[in-house]
Amino acid sequence: MREKAIQLLALPSEGLALFRRGLGLLCILDACLRLPSAVFWLTDLGVLPRSLYFGLFEDTLCWSVYSISGRPEFVVCLLLGTAILGAVQLAGRSKRWVRVALWVLLLSVQNRNPGVTDAGVPLLRLLL
């Protein structure tokens, strides 16, 4: 009886795998769409340098991996890392740490410049 109830309520593993692959594709698209304007939005050379960022958001609990360095090379490497982790997720070879790393990188890009986020970024973060 108990096994039958679990079978009725359980989600099929094929559907969850397809959902995770879809999230990987969305992470790849998000990183690739951010790459052309990354220097302007996410570095010290752009609209919100880290010195101004730390001054504006010092009282909040916002944190970002992108705040470690303001160099364009560092930001591009993080975005490429996000795309690579998304490809691993898309291939279906991901472990839990890949999804956690994608979540951290997505949260970081959102917190680095909160003025350029739309409703899609928090939704993707929640789905991860």
Image (cartoon, grey):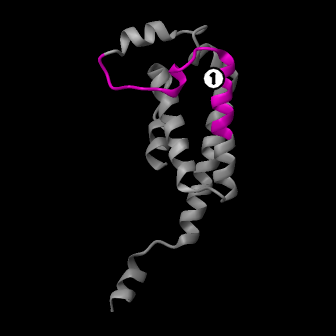
Disc 1 marks a residue whose amino acid type is: Val
Looking at the image, residue 61 sits to the left or right of residue 21; the answer is left
- Residue 73 colored in magenta in the image: yes
Residue pictured at 67% horizontal, 51% vertical = 88
Residue pictured at 53% horizontal, 20% vertical = 68
Task: Locate residue 128, reporting x and y percent.
Answer: 49, 48
Q: Which image quadrant is residue 9 in?
A: bottom left
Dot 1 corresponds to which residue?
75
Image height of 33 relative to 89, above or below: above
Task: Locate residue 56, reporting x and y percent.
Answer: 37, 11
Q: Residues within 10 Å of mark 1 (few under 14, many from 20)?
A: many
Main SS type for the magenta part? Answer: helix
- Residue 4 colored in magenta in the image: no
Q: Provide the residue span drawn in magenta.
A: 59-83
Task: Compare residues 42 and 26 and report the one nearer the observer.
Answer: 42
Task: Compare residues 111 and 101 and report the one nearer the observer.
Answer: 101
- Residue sticking out furthest to the left: 59
- Residue sticking out furthest to the bottom: 1
Q: Secondary structure at mark 1?
A: helix
Looking at the image, residue 84 sits to the left or right of residue 4; the answer is right
Task: Locate residue 121, reporting x and y percent.
Answer: 49, 36
Q: Which image quadrant is residue 44 in?
A: top right
Image quadrant for the N terminus? Answer: bottom left
Image height of 61 relative to 90, above or below: above
Residue pictured at 54% horizontal, 64% vertical = 16
Task: Locate residue 43, reporting x and y percent.
Answer: 59, 14
Looking at the image, residue 81 sits to the left or right of residue 127; the answer is right
Image height of 83 relative to 110, above or below: below
